[in-house]
Amino acid sequence: MLTSSRTWARPAAPRRLARSRRTIRPWPRSRRRRKTTDAQHWRESFVIALPDFPWDSLASYKTTAEAHPDGIADLSVGTPVDPVPEVVRRALAEAADSPGYPLTYGTARLREAAAGWLARRHGVTADPAGVLPTIGSKELVAWLPTLLGVGPGDKVIFPALAYPTYDVGARLAGAEPFPTDGLLSLGPERVPLVWVNSPSNPTGKVLPAEHLAKVVAWARERGAVVASDECYIELGWEKRPVSILHPDVSGGSHEGLLAVHSLSKRSNLAGYRAAFVAGDPVLVKRLLEVRKHAGMIVPEPVQAAMTAALDDDAHADEQRERYSARRTALRAALESAGWRVDHSEAGLYLWATDGTGCWDQVARLAKLGILVAPGSFYGTAGESHIRVAITATDERIAAAVARLTVA
Ligand SMILES: Cc1ncc(COP(=O)(O)O)c(C=O)c1O
């Protein structure tokens, strides 16, 4: 029989989050005035104040684009469309007979492959003990504040124009999402976690080593962790992205630093959910402990597939060439149709503007059967830009280019 000294009380009222510059869905109105059952109290308490899912607001533009006689060219999301490399599929298939529980820490081979890739491709000497696989990197971005024990009263800092999941992760932890590009404007308050993202989604901007080194110095002075989302690091076009773990940035010590890497874009593995975090072995051990308790485990066949992908550069170089050709064609077509492309030195997007509001640009392109993302999805500073993904097939990119060229 289960015994407990705890009495079952009504759940605590939901935590009210600090105000942020992004939309927060209001908590349910005061419960005291309404007669509700205990079951209803429970259901209402489960609400977490998350922003509305922005992609839903693109639906009508999608319908317009789909009505184009030659079909839609969907450049709104950065999802890979090219085949999973043969070497990776083979590794997955060979590991298919996998009846036991996988290691949360990942196999030693996987952690060595990740450290080997960081050394070979990015000049980073990482301790394999400081590598931990994650179920895609979005999962880690969303849960890192929680896993690190960040909570109410804490600020989570991330770029003013950013992938929305940094904001979501802060909210899931009950912390305050704080988008800013000006760390120096922050007072002496406690800041446990700072996100950087280079190359950036959505702008494609690459932060130079000197800039990243300043962020690291600022964070170390305050004991803050710097988490660097580097999922586009292999996709530098006009600039070469540098890892937060590179000695020019870290000063040779990984203390307080975590680099987040994904195989979704490099190796077309978005469907496998294959990523890892590397850096400070003490922090990684702490993440491992919580993830073991929480069952956040990458399946064994996926670990084998990741190992093969990290050991092989040929497929990544081939994929890079495909993206490079699509990017060149699309960029020229957008410019010929009156758009200016800003930043976009790296990554899988063109950050473009024709000088009007982002929604007007989305509408203009939807009439040509081209769907793009409005810059406002990534922060108010994006209101006059659109984000154009270069991840569609050659055939769909060619269709978009043809429509832009005659427009
Ligand atoms: C900046 C950034 N971080 C993380 C992710 C998540 O990637 P995944 O979960 O596929 O590893 C994305 C996906 O587009 C992204 O743009």
Image (tube, rainbow, N blue to C red):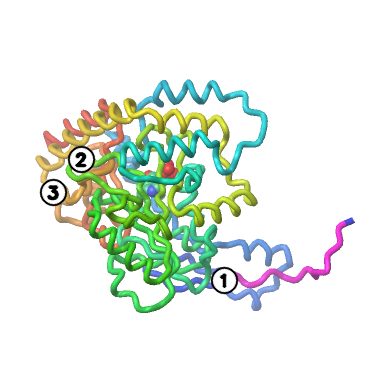
Please identify the residue farthest to the front as the structure is shown.
252
> Relative to the observer, which residue lies in front, 140 or 284?
284
Secondary structure at numbered mark 1: loop
Q: Amino acid at mark 2?
A: Trp
| Residue found at x 9% / y 40% | 336
| Residue found at x 27% / y 39% | 235
Q: Which residue is mark 1?
A: 15
Secondary structure at numbered mark 2: loop
Residue 288 place in picture, x, y as percent: 56, 50
For the residues labelled 3 and 2, the Cα–Cα distance comes to 17 Å
Residue 142 place in picture, x, y as percent: 48, 54
Q: Which residue is mark 2?
A: 237
Whichever of labels 1 and 2 marks the residue nearer the N terminus, that label is 1
Q: Amino acid at mark 1?
A: Arg
Q: Which residue is mark 3?
A: 340
The image shows residue 251, relative to residue 175, as above or below, that is above
Q: Amino acid at mark 3?
A: Arg
Decide: few, some or many residues near mark 1? Use Cα within 10 Å; few <14, some 14-19, many ≥20: some
| Quadrant (top left/top right/bottom left/bottom right) for the C terminus | top left
The magenta segment is: 2-14
Residue 24, by quadrant, is bottom left
Residue 178: in magenta span: no
Secondary structure at numbered mark 3: strand
Whether residue 406 can be seen here:
yes
Residue 403 place in picture, x, y as percent: 17, 33
Residue 393, by quadrant, is top left
